[in-house]
Image (cartoon, coloured by chain):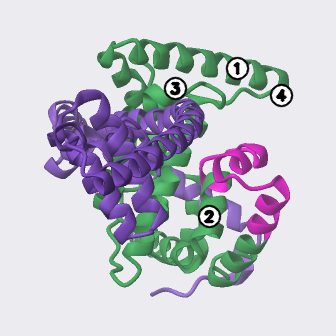
Amino acid sequence: MATSDSVTKPIFPAQEAEAESSQRDLDWAVVQRVQSGNVGAYDQLVQKYRGKIFSIVYNMTSNREDASDLTQDTFIKAFQAIARFKGKSSFFTWIYRIAINSTMTFLKKRSRRRFISYENIDEEVSNSEIFERLTAKNRTEKGALVNELQEKLNDALQKLSVKHRTVVILHEIEGLEHAEIAEITKTSVGTVRSRLHYAKQQLQSYLKDYIG
Amino acid sequence: MAKPNKDSQKHITVEDLLQLKRSERPDEVFWGQFDRELQQRMMQTLVKKNPLHLQVWSALSGRLTQSIGVACTAIFLAVMVVRPALVGTGSSSNSRSVAQTEDTANQAASVAVEVSMSDLGGSSVEGSHDYSIEGISAEVESPDSSFTRDFAMVGFVLGLDADYSSDAASSRVPFGSIGVATTLVY
């Protein structure tokens, strides 16, 4: 069974396009099985995309419990609507759109209530080069720096508008192309670039203590 | 909070920091619980019935659609098919009734003259011309043309059937024969 971690991007553009097409075909085959009544096949799609969906929602909400609920909502909504999915876009574009729309609706309702609960950072990353440099130069303990930076990053993301936050998350954290983001958010590529540029400028000012 | 040393952080960019967010991943315990909850919710979704108001609405909306369709078809047929046919029938029957009325009026006038002449002469024709005498008296007392025409029609019907009780019905029969559909259209 494929997991979200197994979806890796190839190095060359041609390979990447081929891999995307093959992923799309695989997803479409599973969707068709679900549409024909094999409900159990839907679990393959859940296992494959739950990590990605959770990551997007978590970074948009900065709350792991809300992210968990919204991720489940996303899969339930997609399941309820899967009979109407015609395969015009890829399944991942479609389900990302459901996730983002659900999260945006949730954030509008939640505008006054704001509390943050963090996800754990991998040990591997806390031993990464960036952390090594940050800890060395800050003369602080690594554990304290990890917590501090995590808090700052989440704060900075939450200061962005939802639209800018979405674009930054999809591009910088999830690694999606501008065109893919444009398709998911139903905007133009130009709008995506513009929002990304503005959002990075904002983040730079919020995180100026950590960047050169 | 420790203040970072800016001189040693020149190589760190916003992108570098954001990439650290990729590492915020839930553990396997979280995913186990997630899968269980999702499975439960999916099962609930599969077996869950719609709320009562939605069930009622869906039941009604089907019947409403059917009823509206039937009603529209009936109205269309009434307007496009039944009404023109009845209008044609009505105009021909009207012209026919006008002609009959004129004939009857002439007959009545002749009878009236006859009766009046017989009355003057004291002849005994009361048995067969009893009703006609009433009609004549009405015509004499009320010169209203509509009354005359009504009477003429009544006189025509009664003359054929020789039945006094059909008086009231004579004015309704032609109207009743138009039918319910025409009444709806009007």
Residue B66: x %, y % from top left: 36, 33
Separation of disc 1 and disc 4 at Cα?
12 Å
Q: Which mark is residue A13?
A: 4
Give the residue at mark 2: B17
N-term mark: 1 or 4 = 4
Q: Residue at x 85, y 59 (%)?
A: A190
Query: Label 3, label 4: how many angstroms apart (C-alpha)?
Result: 19 Å
**Which residue in the rendered view is the most extreme toward the front?**
B121
Residue at image location 14% in from the left, 48% down from the top: B52
Q: Is residue B95 visible?
A: yes
Q: Magenta segment, which residues?
A: A172-197
Closer to the observer: label 3 or label 1?
1
Q: Residue at x 56, y 77 (%)?
A: A156
- Asked if A151 appears above or below A180 in the picture, the reply is below
Amino acid bearing label 3: Ser
Does the rendering let one see residue A62?
no
Report which quarter residue A121 is drawn in: bottom left
Give the residue at mark 1: A21
Palette colour of chain A: green
Amino acid at circle 4: Pro
Residues A57 and A11: in front is: A57
Main SS, magenta residues: helix
Closer to viewer: mark 1 or mark 2:
1
- Give the image quarter of residue B81: top right
**Which residue bears the numbered disc 3?**
A6
Which chain can be seen in purple? Answer: B
